[in-house]
Image (cartoon, helix red, strand yellow):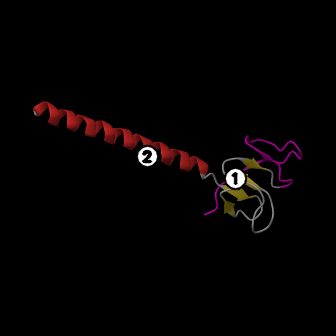
Amino acid sequence: MKKLIVLTAFLGMVTTGTFAQQETGKQTKSAKAEAKYCCIKCHACANKPGKCAKCGAETVKVGDYYCPSCGATSSKSGECKKCQKEMIKMTASK
């Protein structure tokens, strides 16, 4: 009888730990899927890349760099390859 109680308690702990790990993995994947993209002109944000819904300008992923003059984008800082202006890091609007 004691062995049955101990075995049941052990299986309960293992099962709980397995489900807890699966839930954590789901949260990590959904956080990655919700990357923000902001407009280079009006700084409106969206969850998908493409054109801005407000002004039609291109959107840039938050954390990437863009040129304020010609609109070129890059994942690296430095000078724009097209017009040699300094690239600006895109930050999410407040």
Query: Secondary structure beneath disc 1?
Result: loop
Residue located 84% across and 48% down the image = 85
Amino acid type assigned to the residue bearing label 2 in the image: Glu
Residue located 75% across and 69% down the image = 54
**Chain part drawn in magenta:** 69-94
Q: Which residue is mark 2?
A: 23
Q: Is residue 16 magenta?
A: no
Q: Earlier in the sequence, mark 2 or mark 1?
A: 2
Res 79 quadrant in image: top right
Residue located 60% across and 63% down the image = 94
Amino acid type assigned to the residue bearing label 1 in the image: Met
How many C-alpha atoms fall within 10 Å of the one at disc 1: few (<14), some, or many (≥20)?
Answer: many
Q: Nearer the viewer, residue 17 or 61?
A: 17
Q: Comparing marks 2 and 1, which lies closer to the viewer?
A: 2
How many C-alpha atoms fall within 10 Å of the one at disc 2: few (<14), some, or many (≥20)?
Answer: few
Q: For the view shown, which residue lies furthest in the right direction?
A: 83
Instruction: Give how far apart the Cα atoms at labels 2 and 1 are.
Output: 31 Å
Query: Secondary structure beneath disc 2?
Result: helix
